[in-house]
Amino acid sequence: MSKSVALSVRVFIEALPKNTMFGTRQLLHLGKRKTIDNITYSLVKTKQIIRLAWGVFIKKGSKLPSRRLILQFKNSLFGRKTATHGSTVARNLGLPVASRGRDATGKKKRAPIPQKQFDGQPFCVSGGSTSFKIFKHDDGECKQLIGTCERKLYLGEQQEGHAVRALWQMKKARFESLEDERILASLPVPASVLVENAAWMPAWISDRLHALSE
């Protein structure tokens, strides 16, 4: 039985174009999980496929995808959305960033984020927080995925989405204390454009953007 499963897995992989990622979950219709894991382990060991992250692979001879694409693909296998975290965008835009373990006003949170060390900047993901290693990039870089509500992810990696997440992560108190000039200067798109997407942000952001776009 395992030989026929192994053959089916090889046929599946060979049919994929180069530079196409695939995941363990896409192979589960071919056999039991343990059998699939053993087959992919063997294919990695014999260098017929490359492991990009746990449960994510690519054919040998393919160009390695970026970390972002690996993150997005792995999460898509579980029906989850991924995007740049608001704190990363805020830094790039020159906006205040809430520190770990404290909210944007400087007060301690009831449940501080664990001080585990991760390489690079965090990403936000629909569902619960998690992390995983990305192989073949910086010797196994560990990425932090912070659970985020669907509304924050709706605009994705559009400039509008970046702006909304950057403003949102500041929290209401700091956002309201920020000068109008600084907010307008930092926005990647006009306030009037962001207002068109008011449904995807809290009222304390959309109301002020309305005022700034008048």
Image (cartoon, rainbow, N blue to C red):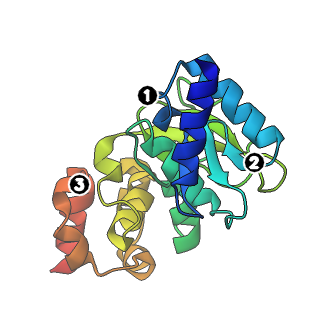
- Amino acid type at circle 2 is Phe
Residue designated by label 3: 200
Q: Are marks 1 and 2 in contact (CB under 8 Å)?
A: no
Is disc 1 placed on a helix, strand or loop?
loop
Q: Quadrant of residue 206?
A: bottom left
Note whether 129 is above or below 205 in the view shown. Answer: above
How would you rate the neighbour count of disc 2 (Cα within 10 Å): few for under 14, some for 14-19, many for 20 or more? Answer: some
- Position of the C terminus by quadrant: bottom left
Sequence-wise, which precedes: disc 1 or disc 2?
1
Nearest to the observer: residue 155 or residue 182: 155
Mark 1 vs mark 2, CA separation in Å: 26 Å
Mark 1 vs mark 3, CA separation in Å: 37 Å
* Tag in front: 3 or 2: 2
Mark 3 vs mark 2, CA separation in Å: 34 Å
- Amino acid type at circle 1 is His
- Position of the N terminus by quadrant: top right
Q: Residue drawn 40% across and 57% down? A: 165
Residue designated by label 1: 29
Note whether 149 is above or below 138 in the view shown. Answer: above
Give residue 171's position: percent from left, percent from top. Answer: 41, 48
* Tag in front: 1 or 2: 1
Nearest to the observer: residue 42 or residue 204: 42
Sequence-wise, which precedes: disc 3 or disc 2?
2
Is residue 5 something that shows in the picture? yes
How would you rate the neighbour count of disc 3 (Cα within 10 Å): few for under 14, some for 14-19, many for 20 or more? Answer: some
